Image (cartoon, rainbow, N blue to C red):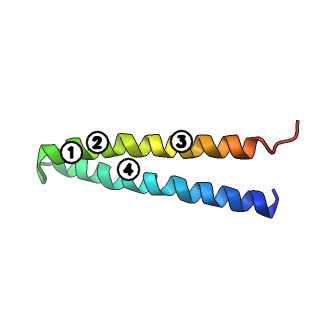
Amino acid sequence: MTSEEFSKLSVFVHDARKPLNRISMQAELVKMALNGDVAPEKAIAALDKIISSAKDCSHTLTEMTSELGGNIAD
């Protein structure tokens, strides 16, 4: 792997971590709602954010494989 490829990969990893962190935080909120610590409406909103963040992460990974996969010699 060249340093340019590694730099691109690092950017993609960074971009994927943001929605993964959001998923983790929102899942904790859902857990709190299930325990009765917060209102159920907050759990529903958190689940919407989890779904959105999972889609963002998937999009980032698709971009990464497309971009880096084009550099593979057959």
Identify the residue shown where x is 43% and y is 42%: 54
Residue 65: quarter of image: top right
Q: Quadrant of the C terminus?
A: top right
Q: Earlier in the sequence, mark 3 or mark 4?
A: 4
Tag 4: amino acid: Ile
Identify the residue shown where x is 58% and y is 44%: 61
Disc 4 packing (10 Å; few <14; some 14–19; many ≥20): many
The residue tagged with tag 4: helix, strand or loop?
helix
Q: CA distance from mark 2 to mark 1?
A: 6 Å
Would residue 14 appear left or right of 64 to someone viewing this image? left
Q: Which residue is mark 3?
A: 59
Q: Are marks 2 and 1 in contact (CB under 8 Å)?
A: yes
Q: Earlier in the sequence, mark 2 or mark 3?
A: 2
Q: How many marks?
A: 4
Q: Nearer the viewer, mark 2 or mark 3?
A: 3
Tag 3: amino acid: His
Would residue 26 appear left or right of 16 to someone viewing this image? left
Q: Earlier in the sequence, mark 2 or mark 4?
A: 4
Tag 2: amino acid: Leu
The image's mark for residue 23 is 4
Q: Position of residue 9 (x, y in %)?
A: 67, 56
Disc 3 packing (10 Å; few <14; some 14–19; many ≥20): few
Would residue 7 appear left or right of 45 to someone viewing this image? right
The image's mark for residue 26 is none
Q: Nearer the viewer, mark 3 or mark 4?
A: 3
Q: CA distance from mark 2 to mark 3?
A: 18 Å
Q: CA distance from mark 2 to mark 4?
A: 9 Å
Q: CA distance from mark 3 to mark 4?
A: 15 Å
Q: Position of residue 4 (x, y in %)?
A: 77, 61
The image's mark for residue 47 is 2
